[in-house]
Image (tube, rainbow, N blue to C red):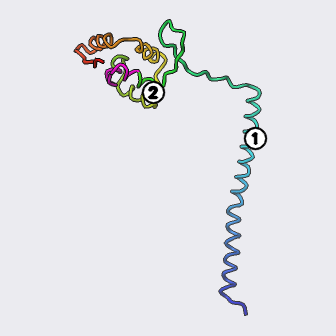
Amino acid sequence: MPDIKQVLGEEIRRLARKEVKQAVLPLQKTVAEQKQAIRDLKREIAELKKAVPMPEVPVQETACGENSGVKRRLNAAGIVRIRTKLKLSQSKFAALLGVAPHTVSMWEQGNASPRENMKRDICGLRSVGRRELKKSLETLCSAPVAVEAE
């Protein structure tokens, strides 16, 4: 006489496999259909790319200075370098440019980039001396501002 425990265990396993298979089979079919749809879409995209070439995106460069033919890039480190060269705090630098100090902070961290008109203004500050900046800040703030001397 067979062991009842063993027979029941085998029967339970067989029924469990059957139920799992019935539950998984529709999902397998759905996954297969979706994979086929993805392959078709990828093929279609490749054909469209061949038919219509993607335009090249130019590197955004800003001319620094009105008469200079040199184009320079302006990144977060460049903004920090300009500000520290002029020995200005972020709030004073922001006041010169007419933006919020938080905006300058975001530029320097690389979380945001200045618009084209701001890039021109920032590049323009490269050629301005500290005395001129001090006068500009005094007129903006209508109070004396201390700019460190060399």
Pinpoint residue 49: horizontal percent, then vertical percent.
73, 29
Which residue extends farthest bottom? 1
In which quadrant of the rendered view does residue 3 lie? bottom right
Q: Which mark is residue 9?
A: none
Which residue extends farthest front? 150
Q: What is the chief secondary structure element of the magenta stretch?
A: helix
Crowd around label 1: few <14 · some 14–19 · many ≥20 (10 Å): few
Q: Nearer the viewer, residue 143 or 52?
A: 143
Q: Residue at x 46, y 30 (%)?
A: 110
Q: Residue at x 39, y 25 (%)?
A: 104
The magenta stretch spans residue 87: yes
The image shows residue 104, relative to residue 64, as above or below, that is below
The magenta stretch spans residue 128: no
Which residue extends farthest left? 143
Q: Which residues are magenta?
A: 82-93
Crowd around label 2: few <14 · some 14–19 · many ≥20 (10 Å): few
Residue under label 2: 77
The image shows residue 139, relative to residue 109, as above or below, that is above
Residue under label 1: 40
Pinpoint residue 35: horizontal percent, then vertical percent.
72, 48
Q: Is residue 60 left or right of residue 147?
A: right
Pinpoint residue 141: horizontal percent, then vertical percent.
26, 15
Q: Nearer the viewer, residue 61 or 28?
A: 61
Q: Is residue 87 left or right of residue 8?
A: left
